[in-house]
Amino acid sequence: MKKTIVIVAVLVIISCYGITEVRSDASDHRYNEGDPVPLYANKVGPFHNPSETYRYFDLPFCSSGHVTEKKEALGEVLNGDRLVSAPYKLDFKKDKDTEVACKRKLSKDDVAHFRNAVQKDYYFQMYYDDLPIWGFIGKVEKEGKVDPSEYKYFLFKHIQFEVSYNKDRVIEIMAHMDPQSLVDLTEDKEVEAEFMYTVKWKETEIPFEKRMEKYSQSSSLPHHLEIHWFSIINSCVTVLLLTGFLATILMRVLKNDFMKYAQDEEAADDQEETGWKYIHGDVFRFPKYKSLFAAALGSGSQLFTLTVFIFMLALVGVFYPYNRGALFTALVVIYALTSGIAGYTASSFYCQLEGKNWVRNLLLTGCLFCGPLFLTFCFLNTVAIAYSATAALPFGTIVVIVLIWTLVTSPLLVLGGIAGKNSKAEFQAPCRTTKYPREIPPLPWYRSTLPQMAMAGFLPFSAIYIELYYIFASVWGHRIYTIYSILFIVFIILLIVTAFITVALTYFQLAAEDHEWWWRSFLCGGSTGLFIYGYCLYYYYARSDMSGFMQTSFFFGYMACICYGFFLMLGAVGFRASLLFVRHIYRSIKCE
């Protein structure tokens, strides 16, 4: 299994390194004066609805000639990028002063279409030599007007480009909209629109290797870093207090338990046992629905491995700002290559639990996370198609993903399952399980599953909630997040707190002579995922301006899948920590 993990790790790193090399080479162009530099128009959409984007020419912009589409990688398509040639020509080191790109007579429908876009704060995105450009397509004039019917709507028709170069390379580009050059869209009438642009070149000393740094500086500003470090310190204090408290309590309680049980063994044999030792014959009784349990453990282990690899790539600088689609490509590739880990973990653990139908268990493992994700994707892709949005995946891309799942993910899952089945590992239980289970005594309401999950999920969530805002603002907004080292520290803290709180709750459960701890430890560990989904509701209504059926369905649909993934991953972490703890304490006593 160790060899398999090493091989998977090498394949993952080689694949993602190759992808990033292709992306970096694509933008490493040198130009002579007058050479054409590629400018691509990407998409347009409401500023506050990041998922609701459309093709640039879905709006009735004019084009200066034949529009060519750029071939895109898998990750770019998944990211909703649809690059086409823009109507503006920005030749290297060639200044242009108010040049006409194209003219178009806007019909009444075109005017209404543009007016609706301006009303919704539509922005456009372009790429010039792989450098991003943004701008709003128009403005609303509201000065002194209370009634929305009196507002005036204008379309910007003049873009001013400022391009910086260093020797033979493009370093920086900025676009400004001329506030004086406007097309009035207020009334439904035909309008002549003349789209113009100005280009100014200037030399800079910034080296080519540092041209992307300006995009990551916003997340590294001093006041932002202070907030991030406050989050880290807050989380570290939480961890130290929690671990110190638990270590002190558990060590003292366990020490007293061990001394008490040792004295009991020296005393009369007929003395009745109490506490967690009393259920030593039931604590390792296999859980109900063991096939589902093993499948959840396997899927959680795979998602944990996926997260670790993503962090490794982030920390070595693969996911620099606007490396289009790199994250989505890495997610697809790594998930496919790590499916063997899910198959091995689920199958080997299922066989340890004396399960017989390992093939069905393997099918359940393969569908446990992919199944809900696939159903969610089908619904949301249908919504995107209905909206004609760029989030709708083309048929060819869907075929590619299905082929990856069929030719890579499934075979590796089966191979991992066969390896797990043939490992013939035995479940190492320090105590012999009795034939008949003991009856669990009546317990107060706060010891039931839901209150325990609420307690278990709150502490890990409190350690990460400050950082969650910045992640949400990056994924579901226009912020840039590049402080992966801080995020990795927060992730480590999340794992530690989840493990400790689950171990503590497992001990208290066993001390109350409740031996059904298997599922409880998994549910308590994964309950942080439910808290994150609760934060989604807060973020949507209180911290964002998202609106509309498509954006709402995308936000809550895909966040449900992400939180479900967190549930499986942290559930696996919580159970593994509890299993180590339970084995340790029962090895320390003599079980008859």
Image (cartoon, grey):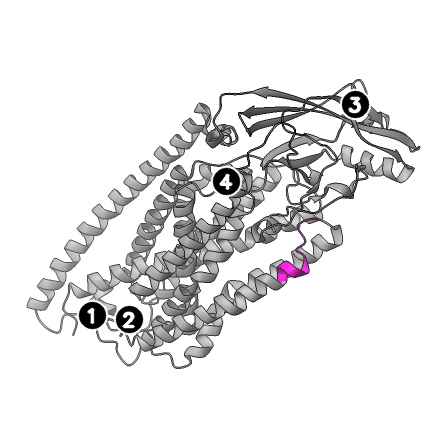
Instruction: Name the foreground residue: 253 vs 430.
Output: 430
- Would you call the spot at circle 2 few (<14 residues within 10 Å), some (14-19), or many (20 or more)? many
Give the magenta part as a residue range. Answer: 390-398
Spatial CA distance of label 1 from label 2 is: 9 Å
Q: Assess whether mark 2 and mark 1 are in contact (beta carbons under 8 angstroms).
A: yes
Q: Sequence-wise, which precedes: disc 1 or disc 2?
A: 2
Image point (16%, 74%), residue name: 592
Image point (55%, 54%), residue name: 560
Q: Sequence-wise, which precedes: disc 3 or disc 1?
A: 3
Image point (91%, 33%), residue name: 188
Spatial CA distance of label 4 from label 3 is: 33 Å
Q: Sequence-wise, which precedes: disc 1 or disc 4?
A: 1
Report the residue marked by disc 3: 141
Report the residue marked by disc 2: 284
Residue 263 relative to residue 102: left or right? left
Q: Amino acid at mark 3?
A: Glu
Report the residue marked by disc 4: 471
Q: Amino acid at mark 1?
A: Pro
- The reply to whether the magenta stretch includes residue 397 is yes
Badge 4 element: helix
